[in-house]
Amino acid sequence: MLVQAPGKAEVRPIHFRHAMNADGKASATTKGISRCNDCRLRGQCMPEGLSEAGLDEFRSLVFSHRRLHSGQPLYRSGEPFQAVYLVRAGFLKTVVLLEDGREQVTGLYMPGDMLGMDGIALSAHASDAIALVDSDICVVPYERLEALGNDERPMRRHLHRMLSGEIVREQRMMLLLGTMSAGERVAAFLLNLSQRFAARGFSGSEFALRMTREEIGSLLGIKLETVSRIFSRLQKDALIEIDGKHVRIVSIAGLQQLMNR
Amino acid sequence: MLVQAPGKAEVRPIHFRHAMNADGKASATTKGISRCNDCRLRGQCMPEGLSEAGLDEFRSLVFSHRRLHSGQPLYRSGEPFQAVYLVRAGFLKTVVLLEDGREQVTGLYMPGDMLGMDGIALSAHASDAIALVDSDICVVPYERLEALGNDERPMRRHLHRMLSGEIVREQRMMLLLGTMSAGERVAAFLLNLSQRFAARGFSGSEFALRMTREEIGSLLGIKLETVSRIFSRLQKDALIEIDGKHVRIVSIAGLQQLMNR
DNA sequence: CGCGCTGTTGAAACTTGTCAAAGTTTGTGG
DNA sequence: CCACAAACTTTGACAAGTTTCAACAGCGCG
């Protein structure tokens, strides 16, 4: 049977939904602290080499939490930018839209990932972030993040790394979109998921896709029918086993080979 | 006749080539200051709302300059990350490579643009930056950039905006690569160049491409022959006039329409 | 002057998209 | 908890767009 991947598994009720608002500090901060201490992802999202005081400071950054149901937006393109977000549990996608309705999924975010940094540039978000499954999100107001780090250099460096990491990730995505065939794209997608699940302590060889074929296609720049066909082909070639949204990777090496064809 | 676009036009000899090294501050800093004061781009690359002291501080960031000849690399993938760069004059591309030789041009940088931020994440550059024409580059050591801003919040915010801006730019590129037809891509490319030239005080309707058809194709995720064919078609349709690397945009509206087809 | 690099154009091949039909799963309200 | 509708998936046949291969023209430079 398929392993229980993150997302739904880690969702636990948080009762102060949509606690975020423009201002307000004291009580929400307290909640933030307590939340970080028993967060399963402890460390994942934090800068390394932080002093004790710095750690406290970091925890104090998490201003509030938001609980999203599948399909709900965390933010929308054009919305004023106020905070960056850490995925505590769940699975989100970011989407960029063209006026005529065409859309490109630009990212996939799992627990421990930071998102929303595209809003800093113009003080407004440049994409939509949508929950793919019920999700818990830590809200980190940018004002605070920016004010802080006056004396915590590791904190500043951490933020830079996150931003830069997003740039690198997007570069790789551009490489995929610009140079790879449909088969290579799907293989790269599966390998990437595999790696990220493994990094989070889940099985890297057996997991649940959280997206429809259409969403996968949009991420990879191909049509849903093509995604479906390629899944079928990979299964026929005994590289994967796929049943709906459940995938088992039979041959990692095979997929890697397919990529470096 | 075609307007003189940036790049070559602005290149003036700087005699302390490759002045950058791991350490050393005093004298190089002095040079940096004098350089900024008579830089034609003054302001373009600087944060807004900086105090007088902050301005000085910013200028002191430019540690040295580098002069690159066409084709020379500013940095290469895997090289240890030490600095970000500001284009003072010229034109550069960044490229991400696949083992098998395929490559994706991920960005095009003109005077005033910052590049190299992809290196922060892993302390090593994730792409190659290559001069497309002879270019002058301002070197901003990251150590300094990071150390600074303790009391200059606008400075910190500026860096964040630059990083975030790169993320947004790449998102748009992903949209292009994932959803647009070859014709739309070329139109978008021309419109983007037009806009950026105009923003720098050059003609937005008549300029010189600094890249070969192959490089343009690599940026847009299509083959050089396709680029050529589409240029021809746009000319036939009287949307542009093109002669080698010289372009004149006859109908901006026409190109925009083509994109939102 | 000729060689190499760049650009243009044509024809054929190939990949992916489009359209359509049918099966499957999911979600909802009775 | 069932039944039905809506959403999602698979597969085939065909169309369209892009790449590949090839030939040739123009240009700059040694």
Image (cartoon, coloured by chain):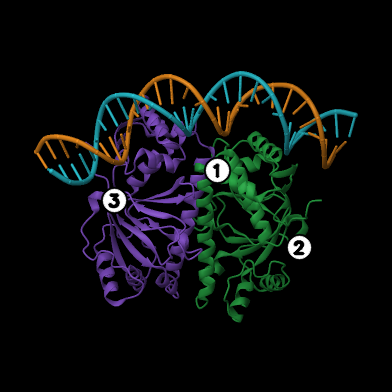
Chain colours: A purple, B green, C cyan, D orange
Compare residues B178 and B40 and report the one nearer the observer.
Answer: B178
User: Subunit of mark 3?
Assistant: A
Compare residues B115 and D22 and report the one nearer the observer.
Answer: D22
**Nearer to us: label 1 or label 3:** 1
The amino acid on which the numbered mark 1 sits, given as a three-letter code, is: Arg
The disc label shown at residue A70, or none: 3
Quarter occupied by the N terminus of chain A: top left
The answer to whether any part of residue B74 appears in the image is: no
Residue located at (53% from left, 74% from top): B154
Q: Quadrant of residue A77?
A: bottom left
The disc label shown at residue B261, or none: 1
Q: Is residue A110 left or right of residue B252?
A: left
Quote the CA–CA distance across marks 1 and 3.
32 Å
**Nearer to us: label 3 or label 2:** 3
Compare residues B242 and A183 and report the one nearer the observer.
Answer: B242
Label 1 Cα crowd, 10 Å radius (few <14 / some 14-19 / many 20+) = few
- Tell whether label 2 touches label 3 (CB within 8 Å): no
The amino acid on which the numbered mark 3 sits, given as a three-letter code, is: Ser
SS category of the residue bearing label 3: loop
The disc label shown at residue B14, or none: 2
Residue located at (50% from left, 54% from top): A167
